[in-house]
Amino acid sequence: MTLFAGGGDTGPVSGSGGRADLSDGHLVDSVLRDLSVAADKWEALLAEAEAVTFSVDLGDVQAVANSDGRLLSLVLHPGVMTGYTHGELADRVNLAITALREEAEADSKAAYDGPLH
């Protein structure tokens, strides 16, 4: 019941939906349970996304990244360190990173029908 300063009331106030008959404590507990279930689902989706990896092997440069864009591994053939100039090495690493990005973009387009953001 809602009381006003003038002493009148508006009658009983009911909630909405299936939770209308729950006490405040039960309502809070119910909402917290719903939020916990939703958080668990998000954690599972994030863990699944982190498990997705993309890899490229150029022979002299190998790279692996996860779906978050984190570079997990970069392996250079021993001859790369002495056989390439600084610029050539940078070009090869950039080529590998570009290939990883293209693979991730293709995966994103196939899975979500859109580009990476």
Image (cartoon, grey):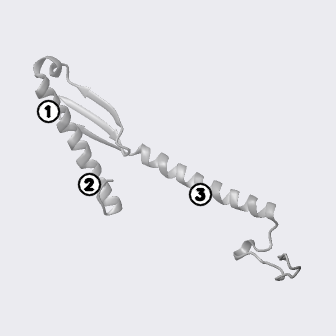
Query: In the rendered image, which residue does mark 1 sit on?
Result: 91
Image point (20%, 23%), residue name: 77
Image coords of residue 76 (percent x, y)? 22, 25
Q: Secondary structure at mark 3?
A: helix
Mark 1 residue type: Asp
Picture layout, residue 104 above or below residue 6 = above
Cα gap from disc 3 to disc 2, whole angstroms: 29 Å
Answer left or right for 10 relative to 51: right
Answer left or right for 50 relative to 107: right
Residue furthest to the right in view is 7
Cα gap from disc 1 to disc 3, whole angstroms: 44 Å
**In this view, the mark in front (1 or 2):** 1
Q: Earlier in the sequence, mark 1 or mark 3?
A: 3
Mark 3 residue type: Ala
Image point (59%, 53%), residue name: 39
Which quarter shows the N terminus?
bottom right
Image point (26%, 27%), residue name: 75
Image quadrant in which you'd find residue 18: bottom right
Mark 1 neighbour density, 10 Å: few (under 14) some (14–19) many (20 or more): few
Image coords of residue 51 (percent x, y)? 42, 44
Image quadrant in which you'd find residue 113: bottom left
Image coords of residue 90 (percent x, y)? 16, 29
Image point (83%, 77%), residue name: 4
Q: Secondary structure at mark 1?
A: helix
Image coords of residue 35 (percent x, y)? 64, 57
Residue 106 is marked as 2
Answer left or right for 54 relative to 79: right
